[in-house]
Amino acid sequence: MSADFLEGMLTSNNKLCMELAIVYIHSAESLSDFYVNVIAPCLYEVGRLWEEGEISAAQEHLATAIVSRVMSVMYGPFVLGNRTKGKAVMITAPGEEHDLGARMTADLLEMDGWQVDYLDAQSPIIDSLKLLRENQPYLLGIAITMPFNIEPVRRLIEKIKKDYRLQSIKVMVGGQAAAFSPQLWQKIGADGYCVDSQEAVKLAAEWWEKRSGK
Amino acid sequence: MSCSIFGDALLIPPVSLCSVTNYQGNMEKMNTLVNSELTNNPAILKLIGYNNLELMYENHGYHVRFMYTVFHLNAYELLASVIIWVYRSYHRRGFSYEYFSVELSAWQRAASTSLTPEAAAEINRVYQWMIDHHDDFMAFAESPDYQTIPFVSVCTR
């Protein structure tokens, strides 16, 4: 399945990718499984191919655009379950162009019972802070892919932790840039780090359970 | 090849807040100086693998932003890890490894020209560490074990 989906991504074959997704996904569980076991490995492979110079940036963007379309179509019917957990906000690092990891995590959190807002990288920090003050989420997840986008995330977390209205928000970071160094998440002031979307959902649930005293 | 550069990176002395602030205030100026020096290098097209100069300018813009993070957080393990990734990614796009030697030396000169003597000394110590480990970075970038660069823990909390 992954190999076929990857081929569809790399040949701009949106129809093939959509057909594969339709065959695979028939429940919230299979959607989650599709994200984790098909989409994520394919995205890593596309990233690797870009790093190796085997595909251009344009091909990488085309491939990820297909995934974005598939996700937009497929996730809708399966996220309408009960909201058993708190509010969460998922954002991509300011300036970051790679947003699929954050979107995948947002969808998976929603399927796990969180009430999720997703903000893309085009949202200025000041708007993100405003949203956080208005919504008072329990959880904030931030995806950082490129190492040069670490600094705006550090500044954002610093503002959150210094603001008495926001400082109780649990902040987790993930993404390639955060994976470059195991101590980075602590240095930028986050409360936790997750290697992938599935881990993010697990950590969020752990935090929520501890808060609820279960 | 060994993991020594990662341990060695942790021994780099921290850059003082005063010097980091000085660096931050001169990022654009240093970026301009490095762009100018490399653009005027007669061998530049060969160094960047006959890529578009814009790709090089983009790299320099990313570099100065990233280095601010490194200096501010004293994140030298991050530096070691990312620089190998940068070497590998840009080399796969045609940039020669020699380009990085030329570039890093240009950043040193830009720091010396733009920063206070104290800040330049602290910043350039980090650049000298990178220059001294150029061969190690190349070796790591070319290693078949590249994917398993030695970070023991992924997530602790």
Image (spheres, coloured by chain):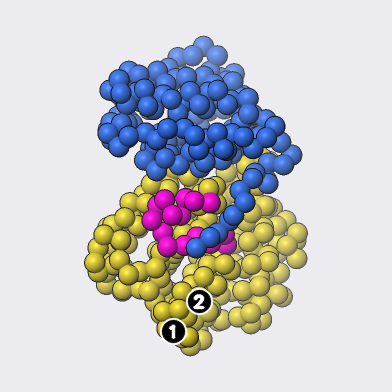
SS at mark 2 in the image = helix
- In the foreground, A28 or A64: A28
Q: Residue at x 50, y 75 (%)?
A: A206
Mark 2 neighbour density, 10 Å: few (under 14) some (14–19) many (20 or more): some
Q: Which dot marks residue B139?
A: none
**Residue at the (52%, 27%) spot, across then down:** B130
Rendering quarter of residue A120:
bottom left
User: Would residue A129 be visible to someone looking at this image?
Assistant: yes
Q: Residue at x 66, y 81 (%)?
A: A26
Query: Among the chains, which one is blue?
Result: B
Where residue A70 appears, as percent x and y from the top left, is 59, 67
Rendering coords of residue B54 (x, y %): 47, 30
Q: Give the drawing colour for chain A.
A: yellow
How far apart are the alpha carbons under marks 2 and 1?
12 Å
x and y, in percent, of residue B157 in the image:
50, 63
Q: Which residue is mark 1?
A: A213
For badge 2, the amino acid type reads: Ala
* Label number found at residue A205: 2
